[in-house]
Image: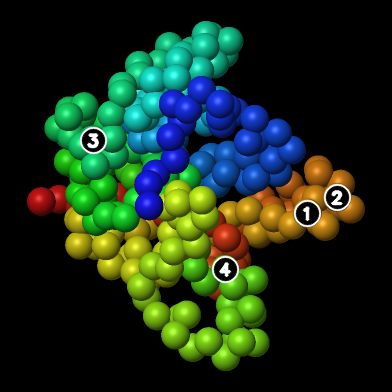
């Protein structure tokens, strides 16, 4: 299985977000709670077309976006111009982040990337290398234990599902992994990170709810629920705020 090819001329990832304003808002709420109040350099690893630039622009003076796709980085540069923000883009891979610089960033963000990685430990080791001592790492991953999956597999009496190992939910030969929170916590500790905060995100991601509940109310409820529901690993997406421990 492969990671998706965002250089594909027939695919426009920006259109994926049409009709997904709730999900986008959920993630920006989470980042607002987890990002440092201010910093100098931030790296968005796998930052794509710069969707999250508005969340960074008032907190950091130097925004760097890394992605494998030249096409999508060009879209990020266009988006930055529209927002009147200066960004630096790098064509690169999360497995080789340290090519951008050693201990070069105050903060690294990795959102909607982990589910495409078959060697998560290697990627986390690279994040550790590029962060300054005491730097902040915001890490998002697809949650194996989200409430819908838990209920589904309890009904099926599929006890094997609840092992700590990642599970592949790939389609069309594109890698997509859901991760157990304890598995992720273990890899983060092994890589040298201390988790300081956890949020459950996109908790009410449902076509039914999005259709019948006003978006403003859904957004407000999501914003309030992210921290309390994290205790139960409720949502399909978990965000961890991590700090690079001293060597």
Classify residue 92 by image quadrant.
Answer: top left
At a point 29% along the width and 39% down the height, the residue shown is 94
Per the model, the C-alpha gap separating discs 3 and 2 is 40 Å
Relative side of 173 to 79, left or right: left
Residue assigned mark 4? 146
Q: Foreground residue, 39 or 3?
A: 3
The CA distance from mark 4 to mark 2 is 21 Å
How far across and down, in percent of the image, does residue 205 sit? 69, 55
| Residue 207 numbered mark, or none | 1
Residue 211's mark? 2
Label 1 Cα neighbours within 10 Å, binned few <14 / some 14-19 / many ≥20: few
- Which label belongs to residue 97? 3
Q: CA distance from mark 1 to mark 4?
A: 17 Å
Secondary element at image label 2: helix
Q: Residue at x 21, y 37 (%)?
A: 96
Q: Residue at x 44, y 64 (%)?
A: 168
Asked if labels 2 and 1 touch by Cβ distance under 8 angstroms, the answer is yes
């Amino acid at each position: 299985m492969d990671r998706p090819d965002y250089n594909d001329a027939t695919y426009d990832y920006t259109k994926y977000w049409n009709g997904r304003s709730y999900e986008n808002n959920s993630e920006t709420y989470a980042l607002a709670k987890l990002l440092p109040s201010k910093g100098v350099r931030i790296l968005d690893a796998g930052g794509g077309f710069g969707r999250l630039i508005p969340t960074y622009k008032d907190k950091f003076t130097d925004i760097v976006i890394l992605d494998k796709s030249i096409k999508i980085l060009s879209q990020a540069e266009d988006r930055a111009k529209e927002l009147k923000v200066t960004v630096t883009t790098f064509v690169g891979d999360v497995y080789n982040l340290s090519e951008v610089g050693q201990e070069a960033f105050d903060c690294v963000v990795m959102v909607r990337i982990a589910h495409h990685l078959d060697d998560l430990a290697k990627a986390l080791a690279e994040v550790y290398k590029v962060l300054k001592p005491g730097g902040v790492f915001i890490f998002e991953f697809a949650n194996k234990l989200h409430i819908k999956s838990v209920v589904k597999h309890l009904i099926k009496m599929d006890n094997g599902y609840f092992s700590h190992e990642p599970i592949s939910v790939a389609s069309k030969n594109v890698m997509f992994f859901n991760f157990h929170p304890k598995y992720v916590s273990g890899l983060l500790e092994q890589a040298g990170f201390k988790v300081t905060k956890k949020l459950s995100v996109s908790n009410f991601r449902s076509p039914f709810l999005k259709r019948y509940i006003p978006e403003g109310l859904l957004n407000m409820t999501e914003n309030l629920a992210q921290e309390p529901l994290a205790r139960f690993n409720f949502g399909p997406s978990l965000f961890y705020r991590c700090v690079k421990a001293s060597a």
